[in-house]
Image (cartoon, rainbow, N blue to C red):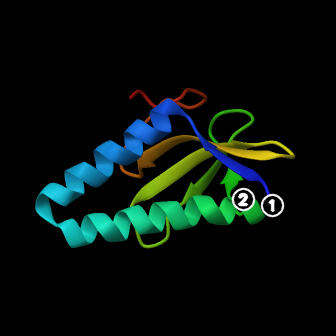
Amino acid sequence: MKREAWSAHARADFDRQVAFVAERSPAAAKRLSDAILSATAGLRQSNTGRIGRIEGTFEQVVRKQPYIILFEMTDEEVRILRVVHSARDWPEGQMPPP
């Protein structure tokens, strides 16, 4: 099984989005957190993501949540690059702004 590593941007995305949801509903924030962490853990076992908008990356939709995990993969590691709301628009071939 591959290691899982998070970039600083991905960790900040995760923390910010869970905190935003928690202001309105702690239970919904817990569901969001669990769904994102479950999706990233699943990537360690197999790449179920689609080819990403940025060369060399992949994207995994978080089940039952409006979020996309942007990641890259090596033989040893899954590196989570960003966690982005699916309604967010970002330029083709570029990383979404923080």
Q: Give me the C-alpha separation between circle 1 and circle 2.
A: 6 Å
Identify which residue, 60 or 76, lies in the foreground: 76
Secondary structure category for the residue under label 1:
loop
Amino acid under disc 1: Met
Q: Earlier in the sequence, mark 1 or mark 2?
A: 1
Q: Would you call the spot at circle 2 few (<14 residues within 10 Å), some (14-19), or many (20 or more)? A: some
39, above or below 9, in the image: below
Q: Which residue is mark 1?
A: 1
Total marks placed: 2
Q: Position of residue 1 (x, y in %)?
A: 80, 60
Identify which residue, 42 or 57, lies in the foreground: 42
Q: Would you call the spot at circle 1 few (<14 residues within 10 Å), some (14-19), or many (20 or more)? A: few
Q: Is residue 86 left or right of residue 27?
A: right
Q: Position of residue 38 (x, y in %)?
A: 54, 67
Q: Which residue is mark 2?
A: 44
Q: Position of residue 75 (x, y in %)?
A: 87, 46
Q: Is residue 88 left or right of residue 83?
A: left
Q: Position of residue 91 (x, y in %)?
A: 49, 29
Identify the residue at horizontal 42%, vertical 73% (top origin): 64
| Farthest left residue in view | 24
Label pair 1/2, CB-CB below 8 angstroms? yes
In the image, which disc is placed on residue 92?
none
Amino acid under disc 2: Arg
Secondary structure category for the residue under label 2:
helix
39, above or below 2, in the image: below
Identify the residue at horizontal 56%, vertical 32% (top origin): 92
Identify the residue at horizontal 39%, vertical 41% (top origin): 13
Q: Is residue 36 in sight in this rendering?
A: yes
Quarter of image, res 16: top left
Q: Is residue 89 in sight in this rendering?
A: no
